[in-house]
Amino acid sequence: MLPKAKFTVKNKNLMKNFILKTFDRFKSAVSNTALIFQRELVLLLSDLGVTILLLIVPVVYPFLYSLIYYPEVVRDLPVAVVDMSQSADSRAFVRKLNATPDLDIRYECISMEEASEKFRKRENRGIILIPETYSSDLALGRQAVVSLYADMEFFLYYKAMVMGAGLVSIEEGNNIQVKRLLNAGFSERQAEVFSNPFVISGNTIANHAGGFASYGIPAALMLIIQQTLVLAIGIMAGTARERHKLGTLIPCDLRRMGTFRMVLGKAAAYFLIYAVMCFYMLGAIPAWFGYPDKAGFSELVALMVPYLLSAIFFGLSLSVFFKNRETPMLLYLFLSLPLLFLSGIIWPLSNMSPWWQVVRSIFPSSHAMLGYIKMNSLGAGIAETSHEIAMLWKLTAFYFVLACLVYKTQITKVKNLVLNAGHLNNPTVPAN
């Protein structure tokens, strides 16, 4: 029985030593990761350019964009009217046009030449031409044609022109039809039903005013997060190569060269900063400017956590290509506008070719923008946005592995450079 007892004690000692060594390794890994996190945070906040990019840009851009597009819709568009009819019917039509919130009948011109001259001087943004036969056409039951000339310099000018004049034309047409039916012997209720058999009741779910900012700013916020993250990570990578004496991406410190520690420590620094920024960008900005704000805290956390992680690991994976501080800016300028068009917000995904859908799917911002619009504007929950959230987690895993491979390669390169430099400085030491 004695050998068995010794064997049991020996196994217990081995297990104890294994647990202690594992705990020491874990403690050392956590400690080194915290040191890398601390060093990265200090470097970020000590670099003025990166500090502006990480702290000032996410604060200023959303506020500035919201102010530029406030109050979101074009109202009281200055318009010139050329009334060739000069009848009671045409004057009533002009009064109704001026009563709409979209149009402001600023000038009543006697000819198209006068109205065109004012248009060239930017005194009006559109022209409405009422023909000389307007009143007689209505009296004889013929179709009256009113011509619109809209300023296409800005699409919202065209929208205001068409919406204002279109609604008045529809209302005027219904009134004319009701009068004719009443004269034909129909009752008032019958005339109303015959003139307008289908009543369209619009119920705007998210963008009540049809505003441009409520449509575009939420998507822009998501893109700003990814682009500033990638740009900041790239600038830091270029700065590191300029600062380190061997031109390497990471410092020549062989004591803390763990791949996971390096990637997780750096990612934690960026995640902390942008987690705070998200409270401002996704909480304060919608509340201040009245943007749709239907997403709850749990929905935003479910979307933003994988989005931030995937964007950070995406930036770390690209950082190996940045040789100086200026290179990331070129990538930022090149990708920002295409990513906005590929998001599915401007052009529907159903009309995109399969190849472009594959291209857009590799960028975290594409899924985050759609998911955020669904949650914040349409009130979708986590289940309804499960596809976007799942894609973001997949991209997080993919870019995390890719970032680890990139930094593993860089760590190996640094070790070889340090060993070779040591061998050259001390020729008596044999090279491995």
Image (cartoon, rainbow, N blue to C red):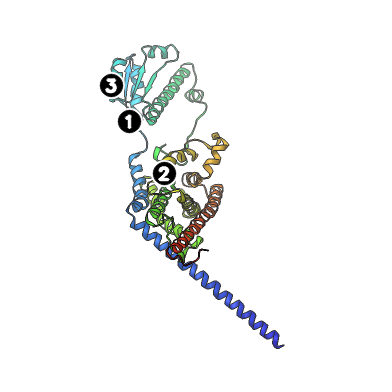
Position of residue 199 measured from the top left corner of the image (x, y, whole percent): 50, 30
Circle nearer the N terminus (3, 2): 3
Of the two numbered discs 3 and 2 in the rendering, the one whose residue sits closer to the viewer: 2
Query: What is the spatial separation of the Cα atoms under label 3 and label 2, in whole angstroms?
Result: 42 Å
Query: What is the spatial separation of the Cα atoms under label 1 and label 3, in whole angstroms?
Result: 17 Å
**Residue 332 tag number:** 2
Three-letter amino acid code at the position of disc 2: Tyr
Circle nearer the N terminus (2, 1): 1
**Residue 118 tag number:** 3
Residue toward you, 183 or 364: 364
Position of residue 382 measured from the top left corner of the image (x, y, whole percent): 53, 51
Circle nearer the N terminus (1, 3): 1
Residue at x 55% of width, y 75% of height: 20
User: Picture quarter containing residue 92?
Assistant: top left
Three-letter amino acid code at the position of disc 1: Asp
Position of residue 77 measured from the top left corner of the image (x, y, whole percent): 33, 29
Residue toward you, 265 or 245: 245
Within 10 Å of disc 2 (Cα), the crowding (few <14, some 14-19, many 20+) is some
Query: As drawn, which residue projects farthest toward the front?
Result: 428
Query: What is the spatial separation of the Cα atoms under label 2 and label 1, in whole angstroms?
Result: 38 Å
Q: Which residue is mark 1?
A: 76
Within 10 Å of disc 3 (Cα), the crowding (few <14, some 14-19, many 20+) is some
Q: Is residue 207 visible?
A: no
Position above or below: 164 against 379: above
Position above or below: 141 against 243: above
Residue at x 58% of width, y 74% of height: 18
Horizontal side of 411 relative to 111 (left or right) equals right
Within 10 Å of disc 1 (Cα), the crowding (few <14, some 14-19, many 20+) is some
Of the two numbered discs 2 and 1 in the rendering, the one whose residue sits closer to the viewer: 2
Residue toward you, 38 or 80: 38
Horizontal side of 8 relative to 282 (left or right) equals right
Q: Secondary structure at mark 2?
A: helix
